[in-house]
Image (cartoon, coloured by chain):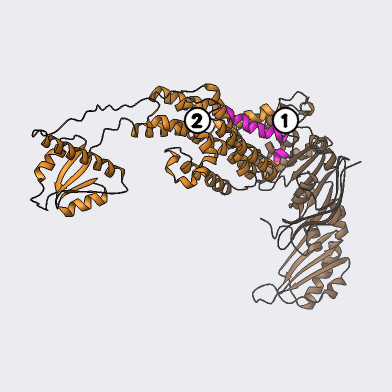
Chain colours: A orange, B brown
């Protein structure tokens, strides 16, 4: 061993902030699996869901006319003819046993039973297609009736015009993309700070770092900074992809969008830190992260609108950070809202951020 | 000035029952000394070390590192000490140089990365990722991380535990080189060979207390020193008094077995001059009709000191 070489003292070290951040970035980009889950997976989801719900052909509503109850008062042939004229319906004849079964299993949306004085329409109360079928069948029968009254015409055209549209901004993909962005910000924050911190703790590397003169603030900032770097790429990829492939456009300004994204990112990073503050095993932190994320995946309107949940719990849902983030993102991206329109949700995010951060700092174990 | 000074150190962890890891421990380690804390697993070595490293607070007692207290000068102390923990898993995806660069950045002054890898003999592995290194090489990277801030005082927690013999030798080489450079080193170990080869002075620790203190030679001579004669007899050996009368015998340890097929007695005699006592012993055994199955003469070691002090082997409850 060369003693002269050993005695070389170098007094111009690099900035610890930079070293910590770059180490974080290296750890990430040298892990192919992590890159897929962060960057690839949301795109796969967007493609899968976007195509699944795109250009859905107008489905015809199945209606069954029950054939085995002959009734002199009702002309089954005429009913079949009247309903057959409406292209939205798919009319079949079946006996009552099969008809009942099909209604129960959802294969038929409505039964037309020629019984008694007038035909009986049997619909399933809780099924939206049933209610739709009821309206269409009623209208078809009514048109036939009116036509009959007007000099024996088969059908009368109503005095209205119908037009259906699929406008950019109102499609499912337009709804989905901000939700995926919100979901990504949540997952990224929790993994990027929560899981990474616990990983360092489990490997005793956190303890080792704390034994050096490293500043704890530098350490935390480097995690945040690294995360923000990955995030920028994530957003550009997802929004760029959605624009190129599906033509999803950002209706609002970039400033309110950036504000929502930044606050959302900070919020979930603080929550990630809180989740990681005490956990000393991978199992514990995974459990805590799932416990945090799963309810919000379901309740906060990632894949479908949170308005579908009962009115009673709506105020609670509105207070969840992911709901606040998704609502802000949809407001800006889909509806072109400005910063004042989304300020309520931004305040909710800011409160979550501060509360989670201070609680995390109070509970945090550095070893 | 002492490099490390601690007195009346207690550490207990809440729980039922209360865990008392350290129970009244005093140490004074001089500058330039290589000091070892020797004891079995669970003796409180790591807890003691972590208190001295500022990673844990003692329940009571005082600690002074390089003349300063943790409470008032934590960061000053951290700038001047280097540490290896018992088990740190460095990031596998980073190279040796990247890892050292990170650790180097925390210190105001320290070694160049080339110097740090040279001390631990890993020049050829500088650009390799940690994940591709062997266990011994990883341990040497951990040592380099401790050295890169050019510390005055080094804490090494079981530096060679879990390594193969060759890797242990390499780690010992590094520690010896540091001793030559005048660094103060405090290491813990449960290997007596490691303690004997590296340490100027030792504290034998058991149940959170120092039970013996001194150099290897001092400890062995405190215990009685000299040589040990161990033998087994097929028939029951005479009583301890008979052995005590042999010339130069200091202690007698006699164990009788009842099981048929085994030796009836196992005897360990501690003596200064085996060449004088041995002929007497053989004659005596023949006269007593005890016979002789096997006989061994060896020098006393730290293991014997520990056994004499605690009645247990160093590693009987170990890994």
Pointer 2 indicates a residue of which chain?
A
Q: Is residue A336 above or below residue B71?
A: above
Quarter of the image for residue B265 reads bottom right
Mark 2: give few (<14), some (14-19) or many (20+) Cα within 10 Å. Answer: many
The residue indicated by pointer 1 is B104
Residue A24 within the magenta-colored segment of the rendering: no
Q: Is residue A309 above or below residue B262?
A: above
Q: Residue at x 30, y 33 (%)?
A: A56
Q: Secondary structure at mark 1?
A: helix
Please state which of residues B125 and B197 is positioned toward the viewer in this rendering. B125
Residue B163 is situated, as x and y percent measured from the top left of the image, at 66, 46
Kindly report the distance in space between the C-alpha atoms of the residues bearing marks 2 and 1: 43 Å
Can you say which quadrant of the picture contains the C terminus of chain A? top right
Whether residue A143 sits left or right of residue A184 in the image: it is: left
Residues at discs 2 and 1 both on one chain: no
Whether residue A1 sits left or right of residue A177 in the image: it is: right
Is residue B279 in view from this perspective?
Answer: yes
Query: CB of mark 2 within 8 Å of CB of mark 1?
Result: no
The residue indicated by pointer 2 is A329
Q: Is residue B38 above or below residue B142?
A: below
Q: Secondary structure at mark 2?
A: helix
Main secondary structure of the magenta stretch = helix
Please state which of residues A284 and B276 is positioned toward the viewer in this rendering. A284
Residue B101 is situated, as x and y percent measured from the top left of the image, at 69, 29
Quarter of the image for residue B220 reads bottom right
Q: Which residues are magenta?
A: A208-229
Residue A287 is situated, as x and y percent measured from the top left of the image, at 54, 48
Q: Residue at x 49, y 36 (%)?
A: A183
């Amino acid at each position: 061993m060369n003693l002269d070489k050993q005695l070389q003292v170098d007094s111009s070290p690099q900035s610890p902030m930079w070293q910590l951040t770059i180490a974080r970035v290296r750890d990430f980009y040298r892990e192919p699996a992590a890159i897929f889950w962060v960057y690839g997976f949301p795109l796969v989801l967007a493609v899968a869901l976007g195509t699944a719900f795109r250009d859905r052909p107008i489905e015809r509503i199945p209606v069954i006319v029950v054939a085995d109850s002959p009734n002199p008062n009702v002309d089954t042939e005429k009913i079949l003819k009247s309903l057959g004229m409406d292209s939205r319906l798919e009319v079949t004849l079946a006996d009552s046993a099969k008809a009942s079964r099909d209604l129960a299993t959802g294969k038929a949306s409505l039964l037309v039973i020629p019984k008694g004085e007038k035909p009986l329409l049997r619909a399933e109360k809780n099924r939206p297609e049933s209610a739709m079928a009821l309206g269409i069948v009623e209208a078809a029968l009514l048109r036939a009736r009116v036509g009959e009254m007007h000099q024996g015409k088969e059908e009368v055209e109503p005095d209205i015009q119908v037009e259906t549209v699929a406008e950019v901004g109102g499609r499912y993909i337009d709804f989905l993309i901000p939700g995926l962005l919100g979901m990504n910000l949540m997952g990224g924050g929790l993994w990027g700070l929560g899981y990474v911190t616990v990983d360092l703790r489990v490997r005793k590397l956190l303890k080792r770092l704390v034994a050096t003169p490293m500043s704890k603030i530098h350490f935390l900032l480097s995690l945040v900074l690294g995360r923000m770097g990955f995030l920028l790429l994530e957003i550009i990829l997802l929004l760029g992809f959605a624009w190129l492939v599906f033509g999803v456009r950002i209706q609002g300004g970039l400033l309110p969008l950036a504000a929502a994204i930044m606050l959302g990112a900070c919020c979930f990073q603080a929550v990630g830190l809180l989740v990681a503050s005490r956990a000393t095993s991978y199992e514990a932190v995974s459990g805590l992260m799932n416990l945090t994320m799963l309810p919000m995946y379901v309740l906060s309107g990632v894949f479908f609108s949170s308005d579908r949940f009962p009115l009673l719990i709506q105020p609670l849902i509105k207070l969840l950070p992911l709901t606040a983030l998704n609502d802000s993102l949809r407001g800006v991206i889909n509806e072109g809202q400005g910063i004042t329109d989304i300020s309520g949700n931004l305040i909710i995010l800011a409160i979550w951020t501060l509360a989670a951060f201070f609680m995390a700092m109070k509970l945090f174990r550095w070893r | 000035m002492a490099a490390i000074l601690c007195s009346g150190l207690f550490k207990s962890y809440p729980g039922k029952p209360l865990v008392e890891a350290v129970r009244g421990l005093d140490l004074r380690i001089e500058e330039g000394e290589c000091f070892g804390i020797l004891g079995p697993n669970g003796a409180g070595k790591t807890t003691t070390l972590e208190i001295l490293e500022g990673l844990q607070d003692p329940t009571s007692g005082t600690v002074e590192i390089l003349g300063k207290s943790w409470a008032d000068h934590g960061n000053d102390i951290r700038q001047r000490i280097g540490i290896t923990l018992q088990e740190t898993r460095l990031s596998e995806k980073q190279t040796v140089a990247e890892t050292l660069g990170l650790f180097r950045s925390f210190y105001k002054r320290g070694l160049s990365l080339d110097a740090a890898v040279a001390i631990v003999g890993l020049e050829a592995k500088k650009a390799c990722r940690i994940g591709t290194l062997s266990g011994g090489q990883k341990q040497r990277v951990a040592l380099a991380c401790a050295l890169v801030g050019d510390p005055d005082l080094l804490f090494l927690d079981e530096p060679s535990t879990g390594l193969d013999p060759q890797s242990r030798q390499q780690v010992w080489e590094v520690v010896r080189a540091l001793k030559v450079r005048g660094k103060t080193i405090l290491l813990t170990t449960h290997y007596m060979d490691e303690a004997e080869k590296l340490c100027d002075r030792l504290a034998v620790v058991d149940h959170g207390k120092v039970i013996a203190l001194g150099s290897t030679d001092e400890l062995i001579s405190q215990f009685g020193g000299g040589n040990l004669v161990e033998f087994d007899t097929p028939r029951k050996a005479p009583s301890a008094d008979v052995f005590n009368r042999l010339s130069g015998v200091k202690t007698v340890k006699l164990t009788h077995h009842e099981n048929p097929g085994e030796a009836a007695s196992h005897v360990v005699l501690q003596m200064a001059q085996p060449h004088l006592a041995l002929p007497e012993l053989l004659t005596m055994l023949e006269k007593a009709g005890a016979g002789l199955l096997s006989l061994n003469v060896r020098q006393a070691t730290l293991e014997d000191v520990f056994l004499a002090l605690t009645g247990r082997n160093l590693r009987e409850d170990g890994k």
